[in-house]
Amino acid sequence: MAGNYEVVVGWTSPAGQFKNVLHYAVADESNAGWQEWANYVQSMFILHWQQYCVDTFGIESVYVREDIENGVGVTYVPAGAPVYGTSAEDEFMGQAAVLVNKRSNGPSRPVLGRAYLPGSALEYVTDQSAWANNVRDAAEAFLESLRLYSGPVEGIDMQMLIKAADPTRPNTSDYGIVTSIDAINAITTLRSRKRGVGA
């Protein structure tokens, strides 16, 4: 069924499950397609992020529901999940993450959303207490691969969105289309989400 969907990527970690909440406009979908998409997310984790991620973090599930009040979703487990990081470095900061900005060039808000990638090893922190460029670039590439996924694979044709934190504000729509992705070097905590920024 066409509509807007909340897609939650569930990570396993020593502190329990961490979740990346993404939103997509879906032109058409099927249950078979969402399983394929979950497998795709895991393959992009392996391609872009796994080598920088410690071996206690990994993707274990993808939860999908239509983004409506009281919407009930379905959990999809990628083939072979959980797949963990492969960094040889064991040291990490439990609340540290790479901040990835989701941007929209639309005429109204929301124009900025945020995602946080966890699990990067401390060996990738520079003398300036920032993430090394290769870690920043890998985080950006991972989220960009999820933005650029447009299908259709087994019936899915989708577009990444930013969901407004407060759609009642002036010049604000419920969603904005993500047109670009950029990550930053500054170390961010998983608790640093700011009110008023879209998801």
Image (cartoon, rainbow, N blue to C red):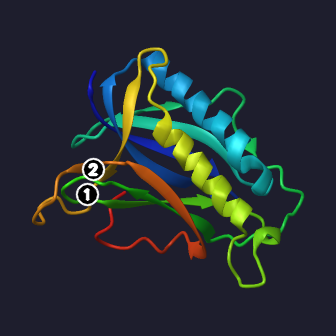
Q: Residue at x 46, y 24 (%)?
A: 151
Please identify the quarter of the rendering in which residue 193 is found.
Answer: bottom left
Residue at mark 1 to residue at mark 2: CA–CA distance: 8 Å
Mark 1 vs mark 2: give the one in front: 2
Within 10 angstroms of label 2, few (less than 14), some, or many (20 or more) residues? many
| Mark 1 surroundings: few (<14), some (14-19) or many (≥20) residues within 10 A | many
Residue drawn at 18 percent across, 57 percent down: 108
Nearest the viewer among 42 and 183 is 183
Q: Residue at x 67, y 34 (%)?
A: 43
The spot of residue 105 in percent (x, y) is: 30, 54
**21 sits to left or right of 185:** left
Marker disc for residue 115: none
Disc 1 vs disc 2: Cβ atoms closer than 8 Å?
yes
Whether residue 121 is visible, yes or no, is yes
Identify the image quadrant of residue 98.
bottom right
- Residue at the far bottom in the pictured view: 128
The local secondary structure at tag 1 comes to loop
Q: Quadrant of the C terminus?
A: bottom left
Q: Is residue 7 left or right of residue 190?
A: left
Which image quadrant for residue 87? bottom right
Q: Earlier in the sequence, mark 1 or mark 2?
A: 1
Amino acid type assigned to the residue bearing label 2 in the image: Gly
In this picture, residue 28 sits left or right of residue 12: left
Residue 6 location, x and y as percent?
A: 36, 42
Q: Residue 50 location in percent, x, y?
A: 74, 48
The location of residue 44, given as percent across then percent down, is 64, 38
Give the amino acid type for the residue marked by disc 1 in the picture: Ala
Q: Which mark is residue 164?
A: 1
Under circle 2, the secondary element is strand
Residue under label 2: 176
